[in-house]
Amino acid sequence: MLTATPTAIEAVKVIVPKGFADSRGVFCETYNHKRFVDHGIALDFVQDNQSSSREPGTIRGLHFQSHPAAQDKLVRVLRGRILDVAVDLRRSSPSYGRWVAEELSADNGKQLLVPVGFAHGFCTLEPDTHVLYKVTGYYSPPHDLGLAWNDPDLAIDWPVAPDKVVLSDKDLRLPPFRSLPTYFE
């Protein structure tokens, strides 16, 4: 059992698996292919990725892979809490250049389905946060792209002061949104 609710950008969905509690704790199926298909989500995940971030205010992203290695992502938090962000890069979409965000945590059990055509990133809100995401395409370095987390045209409302953000060297060098060619129609 699960719910799949569209966000303000309909292609991005919040997935909440049903948990079953007893005296031991809680059990849930975080992914069941048939149940996803029953909700109109027929994806074949091929790889799981996991990250851990020591510091709150760590931003990973905004990342995406271009065709033919584009990826759908199903993101969840194993420990801690994040603000998860998806930016629409589909040029013909009415929401092109807009973003949605959802707080995901180990406690709330929410997952975010980020489809092909979106850049994805997140900001950790607690120390020692662990994030797991399933993807529908294998990692492909020649198709690994991104855009600047702090792009003023996107104006993402990150929950951390710019001088407190923890970033990788790679993410510090990502280009602005306006400079991106059309990767997704």
Image (cartoon, rainbow, N blue to C red):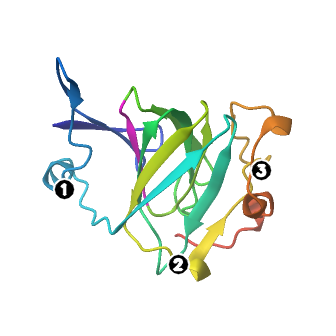
Residue 32, image x, y percentages: 19, 51
- Asked if the residue under mark 1 is in contact with the one under mark 2, i.e. CB atoms within 8 Å, the reply is no
Judge from the rendering whether residue 120 lies leftward or rightward of residue 113; answer left or right. right
Q: Residue at x 80, y 63 (%)?
A: 173
Q: Residue at x 42, y 53 (%)?
A: 133
Instruction: Report the amino acid beneath label 3.
Output: Asp
Disc 2: which residue: 140
Please tell me whether mark 3 sits on a helix, a strand or a loop. Answer: loop
Magenta stretch? 109-115
N-terminal label among 2 and 1 = 1
Disc 3: which residue: 151
Vertical comparison of 44 with 67: above or below = above
Whether residue 19 is visible, yes or no, is: no
Spatial separation of the CA atoms under disc 1 and disc 3: 36 Å
Disc 1: which residue: 33
Instruction: Report the amino acid beneath label 2.
Output: Ser
Q: Quadrant of residue 178?
A: bottom right
N-terminal label among 3 and 2 = 2
Label 1: few (<14), some (14–19) or many (≥20) C-alpha neighbours in 10 Å: few
Please tell me whether mark 1 sits on a helix, a strand or a loop. Answer: helix
Judge from the rendering whether residue 136 lies leftward or rightward of residue 89; answer left or right. left
